[in-house]
Amino acid sequence: MSNRFETSWGEFDLARFPEDPRDALRAWDASDEYLLRHLADEKTDLSGSVVVIGDRWGALTTALARHYDRVTAISDSYLGQRATGANLDRAGVDPAAVTLLTTQDAPPERVDVLLVRVPKSLALLEDQLHRIAPAVHEGTVVVGTGMVKEIHTSTLKLFERIIGPTKTSLAEKKARLIFTTPLPGLARPRNPWPYTYALPDGVGPVSGRSVINHAGVFCAERLDIGTRFLLQHLPRSEGAERVVDLGCGNGVVGTAMAVKNPRAEVVFTDESFQAVASAQATYDANVDPERYPEARARFVVGDGLTAVPAGSADLVLNNPPFHSHQATTAATAMRMFSDARDALRPGGELWVIGNRHLGYHVKLRRLFGNSELIASDPKFVVLRAVKRERRDRS
């Protein structure tokens, strides 16, 4: 939904992406308001190179780009970037005024003002501070922002270890600011990302193999128990099928399917640039083209299955998230299931792993007209839904 964001920098109609008039979640929060108010009150010089890291839906970028033409926004989220572009357009901002980079792109060589929207993932913050630190100089203004529940002692220690001495503001509307004084000569620790670990035994075709994780990917330092359960109950796959790892994360599920059926084309897709980079690294580490000459893979950063032609997939595998930043919501899962139904050919199957209490079987029956329990334990269920041809024509 579109909401009016009122700031001392102007008023802006902002929306998340994809836009949904039923969505009551705003495209900004009190931490965005607090940071913009601070910049205005302090009359911060923003005429130089301004870099905004982690602006979730473009609220900070849109407000600043209305007045300055050297703003760079770095984001891990494809959806966040699409929202930023749409919000900039609504605000009448010249697209040339803003550089949109992903977390996988090289950051600017010089930063005069660094604004950091603290992410949910401490690892992603660590990685991004390491990547941007060489561009920070003694005169750089560094301000972080987040809700109080997002800023911990560990958060401040990262700023301190990687950028320089750090302090915080008083809380306002449950938001807080972080102020860091850069020390260009600081002896910072090495960046530990990406991180590689070996999978345990008992997880099917990828047992004992390596997984590569970029910072911010779900369960980047170990195999999560839900994915482990799915790997133990993978579907059969034969021949030149098109298999989609939807919301691929580090790609371990899609890689398992590629090893299980080297003739399949596996499509890895996620809205996180970090996730897709991890998936490609994991796949490359485990699917040797000399050993698997027929193996084919595509890696897509995008919105759900928009890059997969309708009616072209034989199998979709999905472990849907049920959080959007700090909000608990079923909307993402429902969109994924609906996208899967569109992408599947008649007779194609969607396999879902999820917590028992989420009731995905009800949602699948609503969309597909069927849902079969494949496996369960006290915490998780693996469900299968089949696309029926007669429902596809209705």
Image (tube, rainbow, N blue to C red):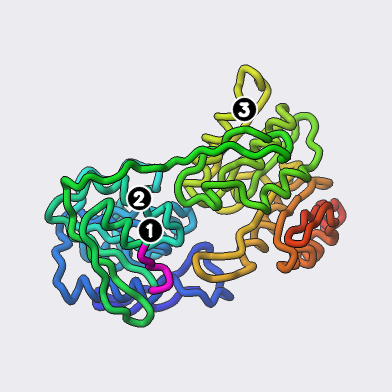
Residue tagged 2: 128
The local crowd at label 3, few if under 14, some if 14 to 19, many if 20 or more residues have their Cα within 10 Å, is: some
At label 2, which amino acid type do we have?
Gln
Q: Secondary structure at mark 3?
A: loop
Q: Is residue 89 visible?
A: no
Q: Secondary structure at mark 1?
A: loop
In this rendering, the answer to whether 283 lies above or below 40 is above
Give the Cα distance between marks 1 and 3.
33 Å
Residue interval drawn in magenta: 148-153
Majority SS type along the magenta span? helix
Q: Secondary structure at mark 2?
A: helix
Q: Left or right: 159 with respect to 152?
A: left
* Label number found at residue 100: none
At a point 35% along the width and 76% down the height, the residue shown is 175
User: Where does residue 208 sit, x and y in percent of width and height?
Assistant: 64, 33
Residue tagged 3: 287
Residue 260: in magenta span = no
Q: Are marks 1 and 2 in contact (CB under 8 Å)?
A: yes
At label 3, which amino acid type do we have?
Val
User: Where does residue 147 sit, x and y in percent of width and height?
Assistant: 39, 72
The local crowd at label 2, few if under 14, some if 14 to 19, many if 20 or more residues have their Cα within 10 Å, is: many
In this rendering, the answer to whether 226 lies above or below 363 is above
User: Where does residue 15 sit, x and y in percent of width and height?
Assistant: 45, 69
At a point 72% along the width and 54% down the height, the residue shown is 353
